[in-house]
């Protein structure tokens, strides 16, 4: 709700599936470049099609008709890590925390600036996949320090409404995947999130 015009469809699994009917309404003709970008958004927003409505598969099929190299798109987005990226992931993953929050249990990763800076976006964004469905937890959280003291936070869950949690903290997103930004030290921002999640 932060723009002059807001288009919100909480049933959609991806921004691209929100945009598709808008482009149709505007009379925009898809081409291979637009289809490539929309397919990339669909792949990333749905965790490589692991969640979403049946319509997302039909939409993906429509986009593929534009001659997309879907294997290369997946490699570019998710499989282009270096040895240094893997070492960074190992350092962050080694410090996973299991944190109770009311009736929920969170799996939390903290990526400090000095650990994650200089690494590929795909490697940093991959971190959330390791905690989104960790046994014994129902909410995966990754704190990514963008600059010292300022964090981008990713939330993933199949049981907790991530969108509601993120909105309480000034962010937003989808029910299973959302995010927000915050500032402070790790112990304080984790405590802030615990307080909000504990209310759901």
Image: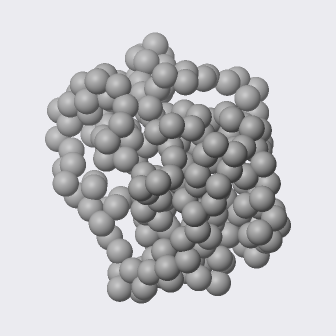
Query: Measuring 42% from the left and 62% from the top, which residue is drawn there?
Result: 130
Query: Measuring 59% from the left and 82% from the top, which residue is drawn there?
Result: 115
Instruction: Tell which of 95 and 15 is nearer to you.
Output: 95
Dividing the picture into quadrants, the one containing residue 188 is bottom right
Query: Measuring 67% from the left and 24% from the top, which residue is drawn there?
Result: 6
Q: Position of residue 164 (x, y in %)?
A: 67, 33
Q: Quadrant of the N terminus?
A: top right
Q: How is the image coloured?
A: one colour
Q: Position of residue 175 (x, y in %)?
A: 54, 33
Q: Position of residue 22 (x, y in %)?
A: 48, 19
Query: Measuring 31% from the left and 47% from the top, which residue is drawn there?
Result: 48
Instruction: Tell which of 99 and 65 is nearer to you.
Output: 99
Q: Is residue 64 left or right of residue 44?
A: left
Can residue 59 be seen at all in this image of the molecule? no
Count the marks: 0
Q: Quadrant of the C terminus?
A: top right
Q: Position of residue 199 (x, y in %)?
A: 74, 38
Rendered position, 177 above or below 106: above
Can residue 64 be seen at all in this image of the molecule? yes
Dividing the picture into quadrants, the one containing residue 134 is bottom left
Q: Is residue 91 left or right of residue 54?
A: right
Q: Is residue 56 left or right of residue 155?
A: left
Rendered position, 30 above or below 170: above
Instruction: Tell which of 20 and 136 is nearer to you.
Output: 136
Dividing the picture into quadrants, the one containing residue 102 is top right
- Report the residue that reaches farthest toward the top: 25
């Amino acid at each position: 709700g932060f723009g002059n015009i807001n288009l919100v469809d909480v049933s959609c699994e991806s921004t691209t599936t929100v945009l598709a009917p808008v482009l149709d309404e505007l009379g925009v003709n898809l081409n291979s470049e637009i289809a490539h970008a929309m397919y990339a958004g669909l792949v990333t927003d749905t965790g490589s099609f692991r969640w979403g409505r049946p319509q997302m598969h039909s939409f993906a099929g429509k986009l593929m008709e534009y001659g997309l190299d879907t294997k290369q798109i997946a490699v570019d987005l998710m499989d282009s890590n270096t040895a240094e990226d893997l070492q960074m992931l190992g350092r962050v993953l080694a410090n996973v925390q299991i944190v109770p929050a009311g009736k929920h249990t969170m799996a939390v990763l903290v990526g400090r600036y000095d650990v994650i800076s200089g690494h590929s976006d795909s490697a940093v964004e991959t971190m959330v996949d390791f905690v989104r469905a960790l046994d014994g937890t129902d909410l995966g959280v990754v704190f990514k320090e963008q600059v010292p003291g300022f964090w981008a936070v990713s939330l993933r869950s199949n049981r907790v409404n991530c969108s509601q949690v993120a909105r309480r903290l000034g962010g937003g997103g989808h029910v299973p995947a959302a995010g927000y930004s915050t500032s402070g030290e790790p112990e304080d921002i984790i405590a802030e999130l615990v307080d909000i999640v504990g209310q759901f």
